[in-house]
Image (tube, rainbow, N blue to C red):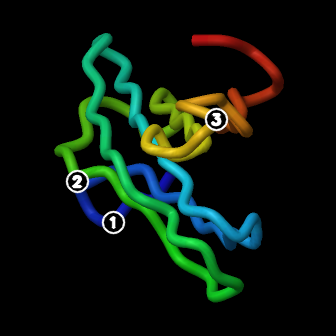
Amino acid sequence: MAVQGEDVWARTYYRNTTGASLDAALSLLGPDGHSVRSRCVAGAGDDPSLCETPRVRLKGEPVRYSAVAEFAAHAGGAEGARLLLRAGSNSPSGQNR
């Protein structure tokens, strides 16, 4: 997650060395139950890249937001949309919202 002034957004950095394009979905979950989501194509290559959600106005403390990034085999590929990785931000002190 990233915070600047009154804006918050989710950001994930990645390197895709699989040799094939991957589908990435990034979600920012807000304290009021609303979320924003971005979809990115993670092209094959060793260069670092990033995927971001749109920025939204903070509602409450930034610590009340969480983010989830999911990477799956490209839907157009032979494997379909098989989930390869899901990673999320941590809650403070291991507590859930």
Query: Relative to residue 59, is residue 51 depicted above or below?
Result: below
Q: Nearer the viewer, residue 82 or 61?
A: 82
Residue 55 tag number: 2
The mark lying in front, picked from 3 and 1, is 3
Which amino acid is tagged 1?
Gln
Image position of 43 (left or right of 15): left
**Is tag 3's residue or tag 1's residue first in the polypeptide sequence?**
1
Query: Residue tagged by mark 3?
Result: 79
Residue at position x 25%, y 54% from top? 7
3 or 2: tag closer to the N-terminus: 2
Q: Amino acid at mark 3?
A: Glu
In this view of the protein, which residue sits in the foreground, 62 or 67?
67
Q: Is residue 23 above or below residue 51?
A: above
> What residue sits 46% from the left and 32% below the top?
65
Name of the residue lying farthest toward the front: 78
Whole-number angstrom distance, CA of label 3 to CA of label 1:
39 Å
| Viewer-closest of 62 and 87 | 87
What separation in Å lies between label 3 and label 2 (alpha carbons)? 33 Å
**Label 1 near label 2: C-beta < 8 Å?**
yes
The residue indicated by pointer 1 is 4
